Image: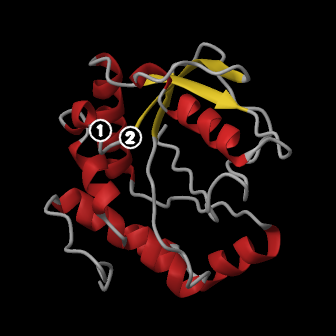
Amino acid sequence: DGAWFNSAPPADPLLRRGLRHLERRLTDDVAATLRRNGWCVVDDALPRDLCLALKAELVQARAAGVMRRNRSYAVDAGAPQRERVQKAVAAATEDGGAAPIAGTAVKRGIYEAEPYAPDVLESCPRFAALYRDDTLLDALRRRLLETLRRTEIRLQVNDGVGGQFGFHCDSSPTLDAREVTALFYLN
């Protein structure tokens, strides 16, 4: 039960129980597999009832119109740092005021939001609590990489009309300091 090392446990009992479950699923064997392969799959990482509650929040956020269309971009390793960052900002905020930049592409049927955005908070209180929680970060620090500094959460919905991501890297050392990506499928 020692899940909350750097933050208070979430008030929501379903979320609190789900995070304890997640921490138990992130074993030394999972960390060893991730180190060895560069990836791993953790079945049943979150309990079913929490997945259903989180999925309901995503459906509500999508219906409320607070999720923006996903934009992808290609990072040109030879481009100046400023240009790479500008492309990332344009891709991340396309529907939030930034002008689209050449080289970004809208992904059909895929919508995103950040749980800390004011218009998303109302639709996604559990995701907002997850954003403030350090359970995953602390478990990965203890078992994998002590230098991990922070987590970010992006909510994403694929509406089932052919949206997909081809093989890609989520980051680039020339763009940001991301070291681990965790995906939680709620379907």
Q: Amino acid at mark 2?
A: Glu
Secondary structure category for the residue under label 2: loop
Residue drawn at (33%, 55%), measured in percent from left and top? 131
Residue 22, how many percent across, how many down? Answer: 43, 68
From the viewer's perspective, is residue 88 above or below residue 34? above
Task: Say left or right for 186 vs 165.
Answer: left
CB contact under 8 Å: marks 1 and 2:
yes
Task: List the residue tagged with mark 2.
Answer: 114
Residue indicated by mark 1? 117
In percent of width and height, residue 83 lies at 69, 37
Residue at (27, 34) in percent of width and height: 120
Above or below, comparing residue 179 to residue 89 in the picture: below
Q: Residue at x 68, y 51 (%)?
A: 171
Does 2 sit left or right of 123 as displayed?
right
Residue found 54% across the figure and 75% down from its top:
148
**In which quadrant of the rendered view does residue 86 lie?**
top right
Depicted 165 relative to depicted 19: above or below: above
